[in-house]
Amino acid sequence: MRVDAGTSYLYTSQRPQASAADRSAGASFSAALTATQADSTKQADFTSMTRLEMRDWVNTQIRSGEMSLDDSRPFMAMTMKMPVGGLGGELGAESDGTRYDFTQKVRDGIEGALSRNDETTLKMLQSAMSIMQRQQGQTIGVNIRA
């Protein structure tokens, strides 16, 4: 691409014609900008979310005052992944790109709480399901760099 420093064109007919490479570079930049702008907002989708995305969503809800620490307990528990042998502690969410259906995890938890007659866990998971149903599809992030 050529930059004409210090040249002022009073009429568009005085401007030099852009080469095909310049036009395609400009077009690809425009396409990339449009794609970036289209991807600049994210909606909550609890049916397909990584553990890190869930953790980030919960932390945002807590910071904004939308969720109490008590209400966040089942969500934080869902973001944890422990090795089968139990040795070595939690597996980090940062390196896990697996997408989970957290609504199904809550349904399974509710079913388990019902079978154990565990009223405390049942109420906590029912509250989590209600929160997820209200928040599903809501905007959860805007990329301000777009």
Image (tube, rainbow, N blue to C red):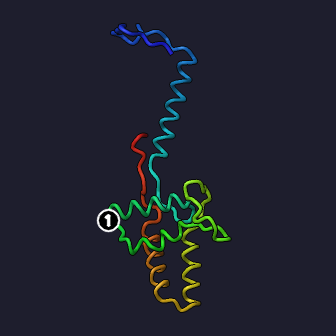
- Residue 106 location in percent, x, y? 54, 75
- Residue 97 location in percent, x, y? 60, 55
128 up-or-down from 92: above or below: below
Instruction: Compare residues 29 and 76 and report the one nearer the observer.
Output: 76
Q: Name the residue located 55 percent from the left edge and 14 percent from the top edge.
A: 19
Q: Badge 1 is on which residue?
A: 65
Q: Name the residue located 67 percent from the left edge and 70 percent from the top edge.
A: 84
128 up-or-down from 64: above or below: below
41 up-or-down from 27: above or below: below
Q: Secondary structure at mark 1?
A: loop
Instruction: Compare residues 144 and 4 and report the one nearer the observer.
Output: 144
Instruction: Compare residues 34 and 50 and report the one nearer the observer.
Output: 50
- Displayed quadrant of residue 144: top left
101 up-or-down from 20: above or below: below
Instruction: Compare residues 46 and 121 and report the one nearer the observer.
Output: 121
- Residue 122 location in percent, x, y? 49, 84
